[in-house]
Amino acid sequence: MTGTSGMLGSAVVQCTPASLQVIPFTRADADLTEWSAVERAVAELSPQTIIHCAAYADVDGCTTDPQRAWANNADATRLIAEACRENDVRLVYVSTDYVFSGTKCDPYTPEDEPDPINVYGESKLVGEQAVAECLEDYLIVRTQWLYGPGGRHFVEAVIRRARSGQLLRVVCDEMGSPTYVCDLAEALWLAAVSELTGVVHVTNSGFCSRLELAREALDLAGMSSMQIEPIRSDQWPSPTRRPLHAILNNSRWIQAGYPSLRPWQQALADFIGSYLLA
Ligand SMILES: NC(=O)c1ccc[n+]([C@@H]2O[C@H](COP(=O)([O-])OP(=O)(O)OC[C@H]3O[C@@H](n4cnc5c(N)ncnc54)[C@H](OP(=O)(O)O)[C@@H]3O)[C@@H](O)[C@H]2O)c1
C-alpha cells in the first residue's frame, strides 16, 4: 500500500481485514518518483495487490507547483503501474472527481469523458491513463471531498476556525459528496480482493454544498449558534478553478454487488463524535 502516512492511507491500514496482511509504504520506504526504488520494492515485497493512495493532493499546491504535481501524481503512478505489470500485481488506484469539470447537471458515471480544469485533475487523469495503458488487472476508484482522523481537510478547518471564534465564510455554489475515509477504506479493501476492473465511483451517499456541510458539522459539534457568511466560489481567494458540480454516480460499484456507503450525514456524525469531540 502506498501513502500510508497520509489521511486515507492510514485509515486503510487501520481497517485491514483480519484475513489479509498489509505492507504499509511511506515516502521513508521509497520515493515513488524513483523507478529503481519502485521496481525494487514491488519485486522484493511481491504483493498480490497494491492500493495506491499516495499523491500530491494539495489542489492549490498543484496549481502553483505543477512540476511536483506531474511527478507525484502522473509519473509516479506510471512507475507503479509498470512495476505491477512486470510483477503481475493487481493495482487499485485512488483517483478523484477533479478529473471532471463539474459542469454536468447529473452525477458523473465512470463512462463520462473526463475534462479536468486544473493541474491536480489533469495530473491525476494522466495517472489513470497510465494505469489503464499498462495493466489489465486494475481498478480506478474515484472519490471526493475526503475527511477523517489526522488529516487537514474542510471539516477540520471549519471546526477549528469556529472554535477560535473567527468569521466563517463558506462557498455555497460548490456541490459534492463528503466522504469519510474510514468508510472508503472498507470499500478499498473490497476493491482490492475483487475481480472488478476499470473505473468505479465510490463516495458516501447523498450530496450537499460546502455551506451545508459546514452547517451540519457545526451543528454536530454543538456550535449551532455560529454564524456563517455564504459566498460564491469566485469570491474565495484561490489560484485554482474547481469543479462546482462533480457529483459521482456510484451505481457501477453498487450494481457489482458492493454495499453503498452510508449517507454522508451519518458518517459525519460518526467522525465528529469519535474524533473531534472525543
Ligand atoms: N483529500 C481529498 O479530498 C481527496 C479527494 C479525492 C481523491 N483523493 C485522492 O485520495 C488519495 C489520498 O489522499 P489524501 O487526502 O489521503 O492525501 P494525503 O493525506 O496528502 O496523503 C498522501 C500521501 O502520499 C504520500 N506521497 C506523495 N508523493 C509521494 C512520493 N513521491 N513518494 C512516496 N509517498 C508520496 C505523501 O507523503 P508525504 O507526506 O511525505 O508527501 C502522503 O503520505 C490521493 O490519491 C488523492 O488524490 C483525495
Image (cartoon, helix red, strand yellow):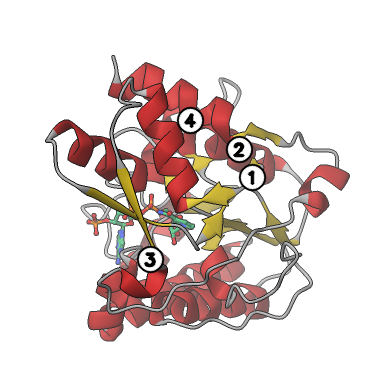
Q: Are marks 1 and 2 in contact (CB under 8 Å)?
A: yes
Q: CA distance from mark 4 to mark 1?
A: 25 Å
Query: Is residue 24 in view?
Result: no
Mark closer to the chain start, 3 or 4: 3
Q: Nearer the viewer, mark 3 or mark 4?
A: 4
Q: Are marks 3 and 2 in contact (CB under 8 Å)?
A: no
Residue identified by numbered label 4: 268
**Secondary structure at numbered mark 1:** helix
What label sits on residue 192 in the rendered view? 1
What label sits on residue 189 in the rendered view? 2
- Amino acid type indicated by mark 1: Ala
Report whether 30 appears left or right of 253. left
Instruction: State the residue at coordinates (31%, 76%).
Output: 62
- Amino acid type indicated by mark 2: Trp
Instruction: State the residue at coordinates (52%, 70%).
Output: 98
Above or below 156: residue 225 = above
Q: CA distance from mark 3 to mark 4?
A: 36 Å
Q: CA distance from mark 4 to mark 2?
A: 21 Å
**Secondary structure at numbered mark 3:** helix
- Amino acid type indicated by mark 4: Leu
Q: Are marks 1 and 3 in contact (CB under 8 Å)?
A: no
